[in-house]
Image: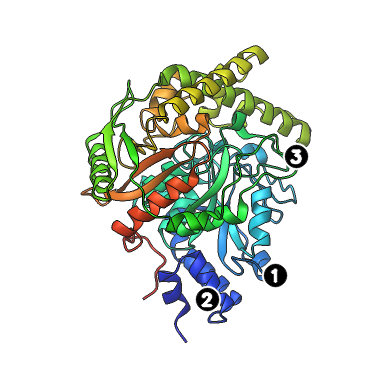
Amino acid sequence: MQDIHALMDRHDATGLAQLIGNREISRNELLEASISRLEKVEPQLNAVAEKLYDSARNAAPVDGPLAGVPTLIKDLFSPLAEARMSNGSLALGESRLGLDDAVVGRLREAGCQFIGTTTSPEFGTSYTTESTRFGATRNPWNPAHSSGGSSGGAAALVAARVVPFAHGNDGGGSLRVPASCCGVFGLKPSRGRMPSGPLVGEGWAGMGTPHAITLSVRDSAALLDITAGADLGAPYAAPWQDGPFVDSLHRPRRRLRIALVENLAPWSSGPQALAAVRHTARLCESLGHHVEPAVLPVEPLEFLDQVFDVIGASTRSYLDLVGEMRGRAVVNEELEPRTRVILREKGGVSGARYASAVEGIHALGRRLAHFFVDYDIVLTPTLTREPPLIGSLDVFDESIDLATLIEHFHSYSPFTALFNASGQPAMSVPLYWTPDGLPIGSHFAARFAEEGTLLALAAQLEQAQPWAARVPPINALHG
């Protein structure tokens, strides 16, 4: 019999599920191996919010397409019945809702084993996973650097080969930014593609959506097939996909029209980000696609002011609810400086201002939809530079104004939030590493509800330049 760790070293979630189905390995040995792998790297990464080993061992086995495959759930607005949900904040204490988020429930029905929850910055409003509650989550390629945010714990564990995929969510780049930082694959689905209940109708006026960080493209497609689709009472839903998403990976190749956007004024992409995206553009051309320079029809500062109207009002509403549930108001001393800045400047926006912000965001979506009449894909850097050093990106001074906070974060990630606002699917693909050995992803967006186009392109890129063989220095491999 083959060593279980050797099998985990080279198989994705789809492959591991097949091995279980063929009785070549057992669920229990896969569970114990995944726990061993997590323990091997966790002291160095600090990527786990809560370990759930005993509940996983005691859970009744469930048959399904991912029966026995271990994973973790992000500790951010995604309740898991057996876990605490802190949202990365001290304000939530030991809150346990005792129910599953809709996506979590579908993963459970598919047979996944939940071995823990992953770290997130407070309320997911940072592009680095650093919090007062959990400390800094570190990058497995170099622990002096950030794993990205806000799904930084998920990305670090997948990159380190602990599990083949980990759940996450994305309201402004929170799957794609850490995927870029950690050299793994991150897809944000279209607005309404994924369920958001039972507690949430829509996150951040529809900008937020769950999915996963994966090592392989086929796992991302398979997870969409398992989890996509509106849940009961959803306010809206994306058009139904014509056939399984995994079938997209085997479509006959067609020549795509790709718009290459290297910068988004007033911010410029750094030398390594430009090297990464130009490398990717040449790779796309070598695969037969047409690539040409373009400029996006966007005013970023106006757009981001509207985004923070939504974030500020939503955060205030959520904290008011937390105060009601626990019987005492949430006070500033329980919150991090970044959250205090957002609440101070945007927590009291009027209903009219909120409605205007939503209309502005929708107007951007219409402009981008017209832009995509001429293009199948937009290619940009995921980030303007390599993963930052721990402590260099987060905000520790509550006296700064919101404009400074926006400059601080969005000069680093100017592209990703655009496609949360437009509702279009987008992905970060790991195709470039800096001379210092740090990954920088390339960012692709497609027309609304065309995840299949992105997945087909990602499969081509993965075949042309496989990334799974690149393993970070901090890893869970055995042997």
Q: Would residue 406 be found to the left or right of residue 105 on screen? A: left
Q: Residue at x 49, y 70 (%)?
A: 15
Image position, residue 127 (x, y; %): 44, 37
Instruction: Work out how far the residue at label 1 is from the one at label 3, CA to CA, in angstroms.
Output: 32 Å
- Of labels 1 and 3, earlier in sequence is 1
User: Of the numbered discs in the image, which one, if any, rests on residue 58?
Assistant: 1
Q: Residue at x 33, y 59 (%)?
A: 463
Dot 1 surroundings within 10 Å: few (below 14), some, or many (20 or more)? few
Q: Secondary structure at mark 3?
A: loop
Front residue of this view, candidates 361 and 95: 361
Image position, residue 156 (x, y; %): 44, 53
Front residue of this view, candidates 295 and 165: 295
User: Of the numbered discs in the image, which one, if any, rests on residue 19?
Assistant: 2
- Of labels 2 and 1, earlier in sequence is 2
Front residue of this view, candidates 173 and 195: 195
Instruction: Work out how far the residue at label 2 is from the one at label 1, CA to CA, in angstroms.
Output: 22 Å
Q: Would residue 4 be found to the left or right of residue 432 on screen? A: right
Dot 3 surroundings within 10 Å: few (below 14), some, or many (20 or more)? few
Asked if labels 2 and 3 touch by Cβ distance under 8 angstroms, the answer is no
- Quadrant housing residue 216: bottom left
Q: What residue did someone put label 3 on?
A: 233
Kindly report which numbered mark, 1 or 3, lies closer to the viewer in this rendering. Answer: 3
